[in-house]
Amino acid sequence: THNAMWNVLDTWPKTPTGLPSTAGSTATIAIIKHGKLYTGHVGDSALVLGENDAYGRQNCPYLAICVTKEHKPDDPDERLRIEDAGGEVINKSGVPRVVWSRPKTNHKGPVRRSTQIDQIPFLAVARSLGDLWSYDYYKETYVVSPDPDVSVIQLDPNKHHCIILASDGLWNML
């Protein structure tokens, strides 16, 4: 996906500074087929499965099971992956952010070791789709990874009753 996006990057709208507008997105998908729940997930959206709670009260008989794990830069596994990919995580206003290491805006031509680089604390998520800015030219990989976590869960209709997919906008308020 990301490599195909590079091929059409020149046709994308530009930001006021002249850079391609490459904002990405988190994504969580769920497919139910033959009694199984197939999931794919990047970012800080989430999927929660509602199941019977053996100890549930009459007014709350369900238990919320989070199927996905948030891909945040302060998660130890994500931070290690970011650093292994040539990236860095720093706190900005108390929020851990992936640093955007980009050539200075007036740079032309290929990126070399002598190229001057801006270091901008930028994204508060460790994985997403479409954040092409995070490409590390030295390691030849994306610091903000597009690789999803995937899972398959056998559903039990007597136990599992609902699925909730939502962005961090909802989960941060609960």
Image (cartoon, rainbow, N blue to C red):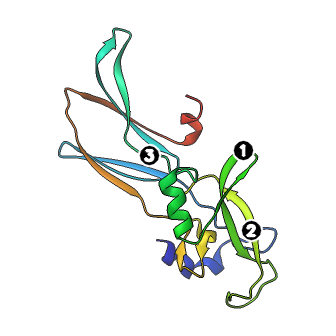
Image spot of residue 97 (x, y percent): 66, 55
CA gap between label 1 and label 3 equals 21 Å
Query: What amino acid is labelled 2 in the image?
Result: Gln
Query: What amino acid is labelled 3 in the image?
Result: Lys
Q: Which residue is mark 3?
A: 69
**Residue depth check, mark 1 versus mark 3: number of the one nearer the observer:** 1
Q: State the mark number for residue 94.
A: 1
Q: State the mark number for residue 15.
A: none
Classify 10 Å Cα crowding around label 3: few (below 14), some (14-19), many (20 and above): some
Query: What amino acid is labelled 1 in the image?
Result: Gly
Q: Secondary structure at mark 3?
A: loop
Classify 10 Å Cα crowding around label 1: few (below 14), some (14-19), many (20 and above): few
Q: Which residue is mark 2?
A: 119
145 on left or right of 136: left
Image spot of residue 173 (x, y percent): 59, 30
Image spot of residue 36 (x, y percent): 22, 45
Query: Does the rendering let one see residue 84?
Result: yes
Work out whether 97 lies above or below 111. above
Work out whether 55 lies above or below 98. above
Which comes before the other along the chain, label 1 or label 3? 3
Quadrant occupied by the C terminus: top right
Which comes before the other along the chain, label 2 or label 3? 3
Q: Secondary structure at mark 1?
A: loop
